[in-house]
Structures are given as C-alpha cells and as structure tokens.
Image (cartoon, grey):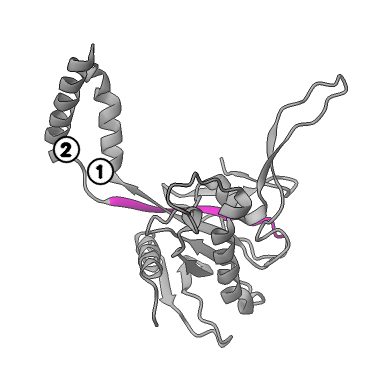
Amino acid sequence: MNVPRAGALAEERVARYLRERDYSFQVEPDFGTGRHPDYLITAGEHTIVAEVKAFETYGMFENAVLGQVMARSLEDALPPIRKQIKKAAGQLRGLRDRGWPLVVVLDNPAGRPIPFDSHMVLSAMYGDLALQAPLEPDGVLGEFRAVAGRNGSLRNDHPYISAVAVVRREDHAALWAADWFEAHRADFGPAGAEESGQATKAMVAAFAEASKDAPEGDDIYLEVFETLSATSVPLPRDVFNGPRDRRWIPNAARTALVPLA
C-alpha cells in the first residue's frame, strides 16, 4: 500500500497511542465490505473501528502568491478538514450496522498550515462559527456567543460516525523551554539599547546552559469530539480517556458540543 509520508506518520502515532493505552488492535482487517479501515481496536470489553487521515495540503497557503497579503475565511480555510472527515466516513460506511462505535481520527504530523485548534475542528464538523447576540426588550444587545453556521461536514451527513478524534502532541523540551523563559525573563530585563543587547546575549547563554538538562521525548494524546448524531453507536467514555486526553460531548439539548468536565 502506497501511503503518503504524512499518512504513515499519522498511523504510526495512532498505533503508539493505542499501545500506550494497552489497547489491542488489528491493522486494516478485512470486514468483507470491500474497504479496509485502518484499525479494529479492542479496549477492554469494547470494540471500536477507526479510520486515520492526515493532511498533505498546504491548507491556508494553497494558491498563495508571493508578496500578497493573505486573508482566508473559514469557508476557505476549513475544507481540508471537512474533506478528510468525509473520506474517512466513506471508509467506515459499510460498518454502520455492526454495532461498533465508528471513529474518524485526524492528525497533522507534518505541521501543514491547517487551522486545527478545538473550535476550528468543531466548525469543520458542524458549521462555520459565527457570533450571535440576542436583542433584549430594552433594545440593548445581549451577550455574544459562538454558534455553528453553514458548511459543517457532519451537519446532515454521515450519521453513523460516533466521534472525531484529533491527535495532539506535546514536546517535553518545548514545554520546558516555554516554562524556563517564563520563569527567567525578568532576570534579564534591559534598561536601554546597549543593555538590551547584553541582556539578550546573557539570556541566550543561560538558556543554552540550562537546556543541557531539558527533558526528552513527547506525549501523544487525543482530543475527542463526540458527534451530535442520535443514531450512531456511542463511543464509551472509558475509551480514549487517558490522563492527557480531552473530550467534547453533546449538551443536554444535543444542539452543541461542550467540554467534558
């Protein structure tokens, strides 16, 4: 199978996550549907099927022209995420009646310019975020809140998808460096232009010395977005629930996703 480099890295990272959680899994098993989703996962008493998609696109910089100021609306910026959700859902469609949670897993290991934070993923799933405020009886605008608008990939399609999970990575050395600068920035505060240059050199030297003891390695975890579908098989809350994992769940009215407390 010819897998693009980013796709291979994404699958390796998901496999690593599954091993670290002590889940057993099969890679591209034959379900007899003519399609081969990436993972059949056994987590305790639960069975989950997952399809992994990565990004090869230049996303926000697609069709960029050197020297031009770029501006991209959500309608322009989010199609790469929506496209991958749609492609993954197609791989899972034939299993919709098997009684298993079906999960789309998205990763961006190559660091492509994709708007990939939590609220952008929510927008890709259920519609471009827009701000709304009610007009109160006294004519004053009420509090603004973000609501999902048009173009959501899961708004009306793929009701069998249980969740979209996003692979997140935190580099130990990068976190250590951020903490170090936060703790020591005031130690090198400049008083003037000449002092500023000297302070910068001193800070760089101090950081270089301290970084000899910087931690190595990284953490891989998932941010899980349960879908609003009333007909999909729910993804159990005791799956993909590691110490770093995060989860968004439907609110009581099943009109939006909110962080799981």
Residue 224 place in picture, x, y as percent = 53, 54
Q: Name the residue under label 1.
A: 173
Residue occupying the point 33% across, 51% down: 219
Query: 123 or 253, which is in the foreground?
Result: 123
Q: Is residue 219 magenta?
A: yes
Query: 54 or 159, which is in the foreground?
Result: 54
Give the position of the C terminus as an image quadrant.
top right
For label 2, the crowd category at 10 Å Cα-Cα, with few meaning under 14, some 14 to 19 and many 20 or more, is some
| Left or right side of 67 for 194 | left
Mark 1 and mark 2 in contact (Cβ < 8 Å)? yes
Q: Is residue 135 above or below residue 31?
A: above
| Left or right side of 97 for 46 | left
Residue 78 place in picture, x, y as percent = 57, 55
What secondary structure do most residues of the magenta stretch adopt?
strand
Q: In this view, does 95 lie above or below 77?
A: below
Instruction: Give SS at disc 2.
Output: helix
Residue occupying the point 29% across, 42% down: 174
Check residue 16 in the rendering and tell me which mark sits there, or answer none: none
The amino acid beneath tag 2 is: Ser
Give the residues drawn in magenta, as a range.
218-229
